[in-house]
Image: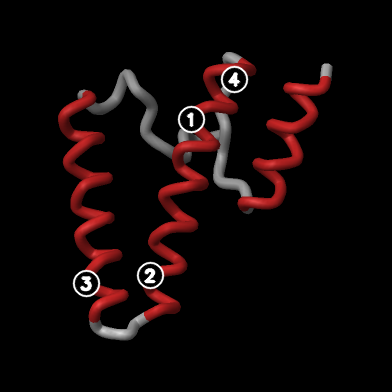
Amino acid sequence: MPKMRATIFDVSGKVKYDIIRSSMSQYNKAVESGFYFEATTLIESLICDRLESRLGELTKDAVTFKTLGRLREELLKMTTN
């Protein structure tokens, strides 16, 4: 299966920080303009990215795109075991 997302080995911490910072700037602009659906999708994408990263760290396995609900379920399973 082809790699679906960047890992910490693919981009530097500075690049990752810049991407997140840019996304938050766009989120703020969307809220200020009343584009709440855009703001919601930006935040969901950032949350999913961080949860995928954490799940990958915990499982030491590649994590592909998952919905927020599925990521939550998988992380909860890991913490209750």
| First in residue order: circle 4 vs circle 1 | 1
Q: How far apart are labels 3 and 4 at the CA level?
A: 35 Å
Q: Secondary structure at mark 2?
A: helix
Left or right for 55, reference 5: right
| First in residue order: circle 3 vs circle 4 | 3
Q: How far apart are labels 4 and 2 at the CA level?
A: 30 Å
Q: Do the CB atoms of the residues marked 1 and 3 lie less than 8 Å apart? A: no
| First in residue order: circle 4 vs circle 2 | 2
Left or right for 53, reference 6: right
Q: Secondary structure at mark 1?
A: helix
Residue on which the image places disc 4: 61
Q: Quadrant of residue 30?
A: bottom left
Q: Quadrant of the N terminus?
A: top right
Q: Nearer the viewer, residue 14 or 63?
A: 14
| First in residue order: circle 2 vs circle 1 | 2
Q: How far apart are labels 1 and 3 at the CA level?
A: 26 Å
What residue do we see at 21% from left, 47% from top? 21
Residue on which the image places disc 1: 53
Q: Quadrant of the C terminus?
A: top right
Q: Do the CB atoms of the residues marked 2 and 3 lie less than 8 Å apart? A: no
Q: Secondary structure at mark 4?
A: loop
Q: Residue furthest front?
A: 32
Q: Quadrant of residue 58?
A: top right
| First in residue order: circle 1 vs circle 3 | 3
Reply above or below: 75 against 59: below
Q: How far apart are labels 2 and 3 at the CA level?
A: 8 Å
